[in-house]
Amino acid sequence: MKRTLHSVVLALSVSLLAGCGFHLRGLSAPLAPLSFSSLSLQSTGSLDEALRLALQRDGRLTLTSSQAQATLRVVGEESRKDILTINRGGKVNEYLLIYRVDAAVQRLSDDTALPMSVVVRRELSYSDAAVLGKEREEALLWADMRRDAAEQLVRRLSYLPAVTPAKPAKPAKPANASTQP
């Protein structure tokens, strides 16, 4: 009886999770298909590895160096470490780590590049007693922030509007033309 009850509760929990759209982070492709099937990455800096991994998860996309339907270029990266809180003794208690990425995507069918900007923030507690550990924690946070920024850029790529071919313009009628035969 107890085993049956456990099975029913487990099955109900799994069905509720599946029904609400739950999925593990990073294990699926973007929600919507991209509006292009090949992409070229240019000057991605420290974001290169994280961005390539995030883009390779989508099996519908091919990363190429030439003849791509779209080009993603990282225009700028900024890493900042600001003081968040100070204790009574005037020593730093917490830092705020800020990572900003400015990028632009240029599709072959677009006249201008579409700008994108991602800002990722993390809080880092600090202690003079554990300097080496906190340095390692900070390095891990920066790496996680780069992965998160890459994931956000890929998600934003999936929400770019689809390109529709331009319709030919109809010739305008002269002002004195009549509509009767």
Image (tube, rainbow, N blue to C red):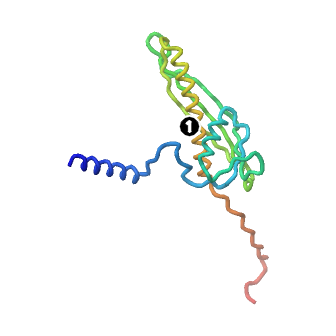
Q: Which type of secondary structure does the marked residue at label 1 adopt?
A: helix
- Residue at far bottom of view: 181
Residue 22 picture location, percent across and down: 43, 48
Q: Identity of the amino acid at label 1? A: Asp
Task: Judge whether 79 appears above or below 113 on screen.
Answer: above
User: Looking at the image, which residue is at 32% across and 48% down?
Assistant: 10
Q: Quadrant of residue 51?
A: top right
User: Looking at the image, which residue is at 55% across and 32% down?
Assistant: 144
Task: Judge whether 18 appears above or below 46 on screen.
Answer: below
User: Looking at the image, which residue is at 50% across and 26% down?
Assistant: 123
Residue 143 or residue 8, whichever sits in front: 8
In-image side of 170 versus 14 (left or right)? right
Which residue in the protein does label 1 denote?
148
Residue 5 or residue 131, whichever sits in front: 5
Task: Judge whether 162 appears above or below 127 on screen.
Answer: below
Residue 115 picture location, percent across and down: 67, 44
Q: Quadrant of residue 150?
A: top right
In-image side of 145 versus 52 (left or right)? left
